[in-house]
Amino acid sequence: MKFASTAALVLTTLAATLTPAGAEENVLNIYSARHYQTDEALYADFTKQTGIRIKRIEGKEDELLERIRNEGANSPADVLLTVDASRLAKARNMGLFAPLKSAVLEKRIPAHLRTDEWAAFSLRARVIVYNKTRIQPADVQNYADLADPKLKGQFCSRSGSHPYNLSLLASVIAHEGEAKAEAMARGMVANFARTPKGGDTDQIRAVAAGECGVTISNSYYVARLMRSDKPADQETVAQIGIVWPNQKTTGTHVNVSGGGILKHAPNKAAAQKFLEYLASDSAQRYFADGNNEWPVVTSVKIDNPALNRLGKFKADTLPVNSLAMYQAKAQMIFDRNGFR
């Protein structure tokens, strides 16, 4: 509740700072669902490099999408930034984005991580986290292993309705079909140690405490704990092991943070400069070193001790559009099997 109230406050108090529709020289208006303090460095660096000032509204994803749609042609928003491919696809399906054509983005961002209306700028991998005294890593090398009866009473998770889990199951549907996804969801539910609750960090702590033996988490939550100077967080890290799933098959599932230029953007030229800046070496390092996300530009060298400690891995190269395409089916499968 505290986070929701804070986000709503930011949404309300910053609204007055944005200008009405109409281009304003050297200004860029951003609507962002990224709630990371480290992004301040991104904005400051962009302004330093270009002289373009940034005004922004931060809020929850659905709130921002509805706001943009309701504002219509009068919207001051130039760029939408958000997390998860499904949310970016929702904005596209609502007709909010303008076409995105940039030689810079096409050169720097792999084709499977962009569309003709939005692009990914950072990655978060969905890893398997296990309790080192209760689970053998050989038993959890693949996402499908989480449905194996040998893990009965060992698996904990956040809600099946959360986009992170929906995108993972959507990737299973895309690669292996609905039947395999159905079997996986059914087996995961049968292996629950508890009713789904909390976020990814809560699952990691539950595994470390022995409340459950194994979970799945976005990699940056693990990296945050690794970089924490709190003794309790270091104790949590000491109790867990990490597996990069599906290394011998499709690769580890990755989701994205990304953005696009909005259809009624009054400052389209500045918006394009900003998106191209997000693919620059300096911005990519901010995503990695500041917020523990993986760069989408593979040539960028990072200096993040936690990411270095996690090591290299084979990532799934499924086109990001596929994650959005199968979200509805993933939700139906989770619902049918009681993964709520």
Image (cartoon, rainbow, N blue to C red):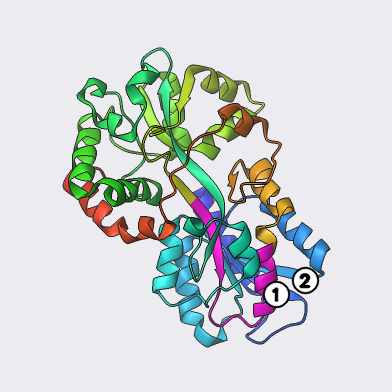
Say if 283 sits above or below 310 in the image.
below
Image location of residue 48, percent across then percent down:
82, 62
Point 46% across, 55% down: residue: 84
Q: Is residue 50 left or right of residue 305?
A: right
Secondary element at image label 2: loop
Q: Crowdedness of circle 1 by 10 Å Cα count: few (<14), some, many (20+)?
A: many
Q: Does the CB distance between marks 1 and 2 fall below 8 Å? A: yes
Image location of residue 174, percent across then percent down:
30, 52
Q: Quadrant of residue 275?
A: bottom right
Secondary element at image label 1: helix
**Residue 263 magenta:** yes
Tag 1: amino acid: Ala
Instruction: Identify the residue under disc 2.
Output: 52
Point 20% across, 31% down: residue: 190
Q: Gap in Å between the C-alphas at discs 1 and 2?
A: 7 Å
Q: Nearer the viewer, residue 280 or 18?
A: 280
Q: Is residue 216 left or right of residue 287?
A: left
Point 44% across, 69% down: residue: 91
User: Looking at the image, is mark 1 or mark 2 earlier in the sequence?
Assistant: 2
Q: Which residues are magenta?
A: 256-276
Image location of residue 35, percent across then percent down:
58, 53
**Residue 140 magenta:** no
Tag 2: amino acid: Ile
Say if 327 sits above or below 151 in the image.
below
Instruction: Identify the residue under disc 1.
Output: 270
Which residue reaches farthest top? 133
